[in-house]
Image: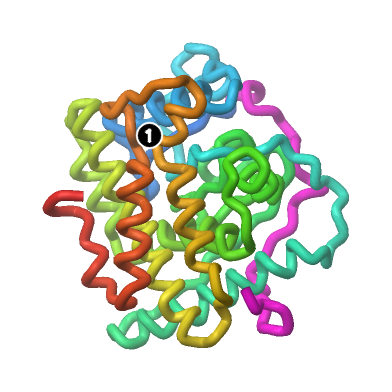
Amino acid sequence: MLWRGRRQSDNIEDDRSDSGGGGIGGGGGQFQLPIGGRTGGGGSIILVILVVIAGWYFGFDPSAILGGGDGGLLPGGGGQITDNSGGGQGSGAGAPANDEMKQFVATVLAETEDTWTGIFKSQGLTYEDPKLVLFSGQVRSACGFASAAAGPFYCPGDHKVYLDMTFFQQLDQQFGASGEFARAYVIAHEVGHHVQNLTGIMGKFNQMRQGMSEADANQLSVRIELQADCFAGVWAHYTAQKGILEQGDFESALNAAKQIGDDTLQKKMQGYVVPESFNHGTSQQRQTWLTRGYKNGKLSDCNTMSGPL
């Protein structure tokens, strides 16, 4: 990926030296999922599934996030969609302010800003740039405390993407998804959730899941995640048109999508799959929707809300 020398976004908040205060289980911090800043009974169901699956995958104690079973799913401000596909424990505290990986992240974020500003403008809309927060280990957001173990996430409550960059090492070393564009795909996916938030898709999702069964709520969550993959593909389409991509770049993103599919992760970590617990999509689905966005760069190709996946 030919990213060096290109514009870097100013919308980076480097909190790596400040991360770690408060603790996940202390101070009354709970991990909440009221999408679009609103809460409802369905959010509790999805949250438990997300946290427990993350615990299965990465060996942390779900009770630390769920408040030790003390009713830690109470409604609160904000909300988040998380990428429970990995995440290492932070070791980046005190990292140089202008380290190369930070420059890479800032450049990729700038490219998403340029692309989505253009797409929104073509539809008579104004794109609001998200902030991207770099943290180490754990962080407090408008969605509450979050650990690096949950992976990168987007918080609709403050319009920010949160990233512990040690996740990139995890992506490479544990999941076998190497390459700069694989990392760029991760960022573009989270920005895809921001696009969903700005366009009201998250709000509709929140309304639709009210009163749903666990299985139905999970299926709806999969559709939201696959659309974010498709939006990442749309971004990749326009990035390729700029001549930034090198041979094999998009293939590295496809491999990342494969490695973080629900079925692949479950089979790797526990030896079997539980389809009804899927909340991000299978490896094949994630690759398919990423490719659909990439092929033509059309938002109309990213309608995951109806029809088969």
Q: Nearer the viewer, residue 36 or 307?
A: 307
Mark 1, secondary structure of its residue? helix
Residue 130 falls left or right of residue 274: right
Q: Nearer the viewer, residue 187 or 137?
A: 187
Which residues are the magenta region?
1-28
Q: Which of the 4 quarters of the picture holds residue 48?
A: top left
Q: Residue at x 69, y 28 (%)?
A: 23
Q: Position of residue 86 (x, y in %)?
A: 57, 38
Q: Nearer the viewer, residue 141 or 186?
A: 186
Residue 190 falls left or right of residue 100: left
Q: Residue at x 85, y 53 (%)?
A: 95
Magenta highlight: main SS: loop
For the view shown, which residue lies furthest in the front direction? 247
Query: Does the image show residue 227?
Result: yes
Q: Position of residue 174 (x, y in %)?
A: 63, 38
Q: Position of residue 33 (x, y in %)?
A: 41, 37
Q: Is residue 13 magenta?
A: yes
Q: Position of residue 151 (x, y in %)?
A: 57, 42
Q: How is the image coloured?
A: rainbow
Q: Amino acid at mark 1?
A: Asp
Residue 99 falls left or right of residue 54: right
Q: Residue at x 53, y 20 (%)?
A: 62
Residue annotated with mark 1? 263
Q: Is residue 300 magenta?
A: no
Q: Is residue 178 above or below residue 71?
A: below
Q: Residue at x 54, y 68 (%)?
A: 248
